[in-house]
Amino acid sequence: MWKWLHPYAKPEITYHFTGRLLPWFAYLTAILLSIGIVWALLFAPADYQQGDSFRIFYLHVPAASLSMGIYVGMAIAALCSLVWQLKLADASAAAMAPVGAVFTAIALITGAAWGKPMWGTWWIWDARLTSELILLFLYLGVIALHNAFEDKALAGKAAAILTLVGVINIPIIKYSVEWWNTLHQGATVSKLGKPSMTMDMFWPFVFCFLGFSLLVATIICIRFRTEILARNSMRPWVRELVEKVEG
Amino acid sequence: MQFDSINAFFNMGGYAFYVWLSYGVSAFFLFTLVFSSKANNQKIIKKIAQRHKREEKLRQAAKLQNEQNKINAKNTKTSPEEKS
């Protein structure tokens, strides 16, 4: 049943497949994000309590949930590389880490810029903020481990173990607003059933969220292809491909 | 449209600094990430191409050296015969 997946374990096939996907990801990102951002900045109504500072929401929430989503993806890739020794899983985990780190940083910075006018402080050591900061350190640790060894397989193994240990942080971030007393507000969008916001705020959020998700896919695609080339530089197909590009 | 004028838009209901800080930093980070990812891709391709060229050069040099050695060996073999 899953046999159709087997060819994609071959670097050459996956390289060409991702090459065909990449322009679709890029164009969809451009369309969705420009609609989403313009809608969020110009047409979405201001919040009745938070005023126009609520427009930070359209960056903060997608960035924060994607920072966790990318980590889960990286953990699945790490597990596959540890258990089945899939070299491409290693390459994809290495491609995901920097993207996740940037989205975590964006979530933290937009969160601080939203916290200052709403809570009166840029930063507070409460559960949600601290666990998200730990997520940033986990990403930085994984990136450092990937670059720490000359031998990519060894580096991948070390990074994969750190990634899997760090998974414990994900439910802590997710449920921190319920488990502990915190300044951070509870979930708005991902509540089961109906999201607790009006539709004219919800739709621009959907466009922003999908746009950022596709942006993540685009960047990971580019980095994944770079990793594949770097790890297969001695193969004949890479030789041919490089000669075609460089002339 | 939620704003009456371009000034009101930039003012963001008094939250201008925080809103534009968020959007500015996010845009800067994301553009940097996209461009550095693309630049990395090109760099790797160039690096691999250079390595292949260097290997090709080394192979050519080894081939020449090999031929030279053969000629030298022949000369040293033939030269004593010429003398005698």
Image (spheres, rainbow, N blue to C red):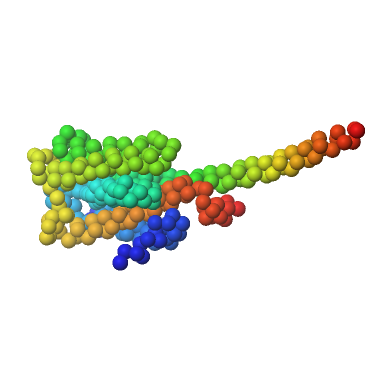
Q: Is residue A209 above or below residue A107?
A: below
Judged left or right of residue A161, residue B51 is right
The reply to whether residue A178 is in sight is yes
Q: Residue A140: which quarter of the image?
A: top left
Residue ID at (30%, 53%) = A212
Expressed as whole percent of the image width and height from the top left, the position of residue A216 reads 33, 52
The residue lying toward the viewer, choosing from A43 and B33, is: B33
Judged left or right of residue A28, residue A72 is left
Q: In this view, does B19 lie above or below A205?
A: above
The residue lying toward the viewer, choosing from A145 and A59, is: A145
Residue ID at (39%, 51%) = A88
Image quarter in which the N terminus of chain A is found? bottom left
Judged left or right of residue A227, residue A128 is left
Q: Is residue A72 above or below residue A149?
A: below
Expressed as whole percent of the image width and height from the top left, the position of residue A44 reads 22, 56
Judged left or right of residue A237, residue B55 is right
The reply to whether residue A52 is in sight is no
Residue ID at (22%, 40%) = A132
Expressed as whole percent of the image width and height from the top left, the position of residue A163 reads 28, 42
